[in-house]
Image (cartoon, rainbow, N blue to C red):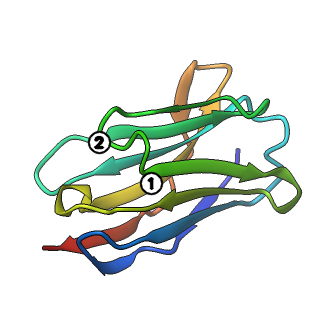
Amino acid sequence: QVQLVESGGGLVRDGGSLRLSCTASRSIATITSMAWYRQPPGKQRELVAAITNRGRTNYAESVEGRFIISRDNAKNTVYLQMDRLKPEDTAVYYCARYNSDTLRFDSWGQGTQVTVSS
């Protein structure tokens, strides 16, 4: 099992930027894929971005071109650079790892709040 801790959230104005970090309790080098999810107020959790251990990335259409996911295996950390933020990006952001046994993302952290004011 791996524990994930998210950080970097905060309050930012429309058009601003934030960089989220997700630090793991152990090496992530062998984890097939890491992802960022978010849960807006009153809505279901949704996938924002994912990155494989080979560096392949995919993004939700709503963040394509504004967000960049990256990973530093040496630091056991996954990042989410968020630019040109919009009020609709307001949510609690979670980090997760892909479990190759269950074929699902799990090991959710406590989340970090991102609030974008208009």
Q: Secondary structure at mark 2?
A: loop
**Relative depth, front residue between 84 and 44:** 84
Would you identify the image quadrant in which residue 93 lies?
A: bottom left
Residue placed under numbered mark 1 in the picture: 94
Residue type for callout 2 = Arg
Q: Earlier in the sequence, mark 1 or mark 2?
A: 2
Residue 41 falls left or right of residue 100? left
- Quarter of the figure with the C terminus: bottom left
Would you identify the image quadrant in which residue 4 lies?
A: bottom right
User: What residue sits 57% from the left and 18% below the top?
Assistant: 103
Residue type for callout 1 = Tyr
Taking 12 as reference, is 98 above or below it?
above
Residue 67 falls left or right of residue 13? right
Residue 111 falls left or right of residue 31? left
How far from the left and from the top, in percent, is residue 69?
58, 48
Whether tag 1 and tag 2 are in contact, CB under 8 A, the answer is yes
Residue 38 falls left or right of residue 80? left
Local packing at callout 2 (Cα closer than 10 Å; few below 14, some 14-19, many 20+) is some
**Relative depth, front residue between 61 and 53:** 61
- Quarter of the figure with the N terminus: top right
User: What residue sits 81% from the left and 55% below the top?
Assistant: 26
Residue placed under numbered mark 2 in the picture: 45
Taking 10 as reference, is 29 above or below it?
above
User: What residue sits 46% from the left and 51% below the top?
Assistant: 67
Q: Secondary structure at mark 1?
A: strand
